[in-house]
C-alpha cells in the first residue's frame, strides 16, 4: 500500500473510530485491539495503529502500560469544556502573535496554509475536499500556536487540543454529507483569513476574539449532531443533564 493510501485510510479510521466512541459503540473502559478493528473497518493494521495513536493524542484513548489502548471515560460537559479551553488558549496565542509581531517565516507559513485551504473549496457550496481540508486545518492551528513565539503558550494549546474532542480536526463522519457542516467549513475558512489579517494588522484584541469564535464552530457542529440524534443523549454520561 502506498504511503498516500495509508495516510488516507488512517484519517478515515480516525474519523470512524471517533464516531464509534461518541455514539457509545466503543464505550469508556473498553480495550481496543488492532486486528479486530482492522477487520471491522476493512483496512490494514498499519492505518489502524496510526489512528489509535492519534486518538490517544486527542485524549479519547488511554495507553495501557502493558501495551494497547482503552477508551477514556468522559462526559459531554468534558467535551464542551475542552473545546472552550482550546478556544481561550488559541485566542491568547493569536493575541500575543499580533501584539508582539510574528516572525516573517512563521507568518509566511501561515499565509501559505490559508492559501492552500482556499483550494479545498469548489464553486458550489457542497464542493469541499474534506481530507485535504482536515490535514491543512490541523497545520493551521499548529502554526497559530507557534506564531505566538511563546513555548509556554504553544505547549498549553497542544495540551488543550489533546482533551476529548477538542482537537481542531476532531470531525465526525456522519457530518461529512450534511450541508450545514459544509457551510461551517467555509465559515471557518473565512475566520482563518480574518485571524491572519488581524495578526498582520497587529490587532491583538480582534485576533483573540476571532480565534475564540472559531473554536465555537466545533462546539456548534457537535451540538448539531446531538440535535439530529437524540438517542446520543442517553449514551454519554452527563449529556442529558447539560445539553440544550
Image (cartoon, grey):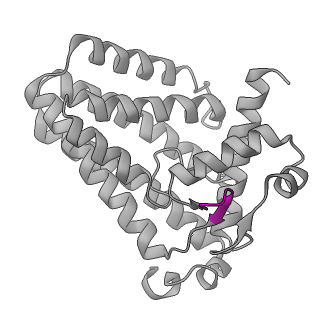
The answer to if 69 sits in the magenta stretch is yes
Q: Is residue 177 visible?
A: no
Quadrant housing the C terminus? bottom left
Task: Say which residue appears at 65% left-offset and 37% top-offset.
Answer: 126
User: As rendered, which of 149 and 197 lies closer to the eye?
Assistant: 149
**186 left or right of 197 in image:** right
Give the residue furthest to the front: 66
Q: Is residue 236 above or below residue 113?
A: below
Q: Which residues are magenta?
A: 65-70
Where is residue 156? Give x, y as percent: 28, 48
The answer to if 215 sits in the magenta stretch is no
Q: Is residue 50 above or below residue 181?
A: above
Give the residue furthest to the left: 99
Where is residue 133? Give x, y as percent: 56, 31
Q: Is residue 185 above or below residue 224?
A: above
Quadrant housing the N terminus? top right
Task: Say which residue appears at 71% left-offset and 64% top-offset.
Answer: 20
Q: Is residue 215 above or below residue 28?
A: above
**184 left or right of 44 in image:** left
**In terms of secondary structure, what is the magenta stretch mainly?**
loop
Amino acid at each position: 500500500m502506498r504511503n498516500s493510501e495509508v495516510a488516507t485510510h488512517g484519517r478515515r479510521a480516525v474519523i470512524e473510530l471517533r464516531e464509534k466512541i461518541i455514539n457509545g459503540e466503543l464505550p469508556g473502559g473498553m480495550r481496543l485491539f488492532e486486528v479486530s478493528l482492522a477487520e471491522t473497518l476493512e483496512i490494514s493494521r498499519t492505518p489502524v495503529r496510526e489512528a489509535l495513536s492519534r486518538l490517544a493524542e486527542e485524549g479519547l484513548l488511554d495507553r495501557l502500560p502493558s501495551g494497547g489502548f482503552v477508551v477514556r471515560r468522559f462526559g459531554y460537559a468534558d467535551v464542551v469544556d475542552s473545546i472552550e479551553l482550546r478556544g481561550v488558549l488559541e485566542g491568547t496565542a493569536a493575541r500575543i502573535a499580533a501584539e508582539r509581531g510574528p516572525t516573517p517565516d512563521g507568518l509566511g507559513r501561515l499565509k501559505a496554509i490559508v492559501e492552500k485551504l482556499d483550494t479545498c473549496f469548489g464553486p458550489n457550496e457542497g464542493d469541499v475536499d474534506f481530507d485535504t481540508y482536515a490535514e491543512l486545518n490541523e497545520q493551521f492551528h499548529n502554526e497559530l500556536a507557534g506564531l505566538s513565539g511563546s513555548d509556554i503558550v504553544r505547549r498549553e494549546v497542544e495540551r488543550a487540543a489533546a482533551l476529548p474532542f477538542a482537537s481542531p480536526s476532531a470531525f465526525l463522519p456522519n457530518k461529512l454529507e450534511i450541508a450545514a457542516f459544509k457551510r461551517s467549513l467555509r465559515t471557518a475558512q473565512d475566520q482563518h483569513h480574518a485571524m491572519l489579517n488581524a495578526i498582520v494588522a497587529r490587532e491583538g484584541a480582534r485576533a483573540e476574539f476571532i480565534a475564540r469564535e472559531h473554536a465555537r464552530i466545533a462546539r456548534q457542529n457537535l451540538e448539531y449532531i446531538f440535535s439530529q440524534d437524540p438517542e446520543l443523549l442517553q449514551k454519554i454520561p452527563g449529556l442529558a443533564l447539560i445539553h440544550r
